[in-house]
Image (cartoon, rainbow, N blue to C red):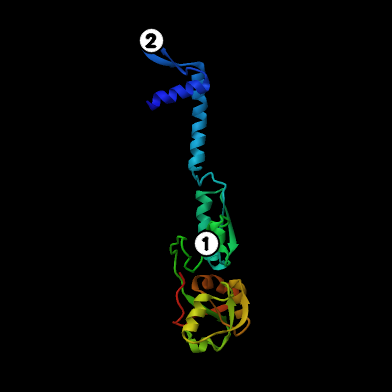
Amino acid sequence: MLSFALRFRLRSALDDELLVRSGGTYERTPRGDQLLDDLQTLLPRLDAAVRGNRFDPATSKDRFSIATTDYAASILIPTVLERIATAAPHVRIEIVPWNDRVFNDIEAGRVHLAIIGVQPPEPFESEPLFSDDFVCVVAENHPLRAARLTLKRYVEYGHAVVAIGRDGGQPWIERALAANGLERRVAYRSPYQLSAMLAASRTTMICTTARLLAKQLAPVANVRLLAAPRELPKIT
């Protein structure tokens, strides 16, 4: 019944029989042939518009925006770029600085991915990539000589702090110190890891940063690495 109704509507709308009986079969009219050709061109385009274009990394020229700190940008992104250069050679990667508006930017489509050591709010999905621990970066001639610092010794010196988060601190460290009733004296604050490490290399300040990055930058900054107080957490 539906098939008959559809045929009737098409014939009425197009003012053409579309199919005519020839012997024991049906043949398309010239208008029917034209309509079939048009549909064969139109339907795949319509299907692609509804489903969206399939992503082909080998030919994609898309730009992907990643929000992160210079720590993750230094540790993780070079390996990512190495793999992208082979799998998706025309893709462009843009790193934008981590800030307190990043989750809003993801919702708005301005940022595609965030790499950060904090738990995202609902409804964002996340998964752990790797873990690291903190080390204390000090000048080669710093009076601290112990392999690992205690909290007491840790707070005796000024600190070169890498500014992350709304309050310009390192939230993992500040929370651990507060839980022990302590607070460190910030002598220098910078959003850049290397800048904070170089500040420590010329003074008695302590720069607390992640081990993986510290090991990369230590030869450049001319510093020593000491194990951080056990009370400081790991970074995920």
Nearer-N-terminus badge (2/1): 2
Please give left or right for residue 142 compared with residue 231 in the image: right
SS assignment at label 1: strand
SS assignment at label 2: loop
- Three-letter code for the amino acid on which mark 1 is drawn: Ala
* Picture layout, residue 5 above or below residue 141: above
Residue sitting nearer the eye, 57 or 46: 46
Residue 94: % across, % down: 59, 57
Foreground tag (2 vs 1): 2
Residue 167's disc number: none
Residue sitting nearer the eye, 111 or 210: 111
Please give left or right for residue 224 compared with residue 230 in the image: right
* Picture layout, residue 234 above or below residue 14: below
Q: What residue does disc 1 label?
A: 114
Q: Quadrant of residue 131?
A: bottom left
* Picture layout, residue 49 above or below residue 221: above
The C terminus lies in which quarter of the figure?
bottom left
Residue occupying the point 46% across, 74% down: 133
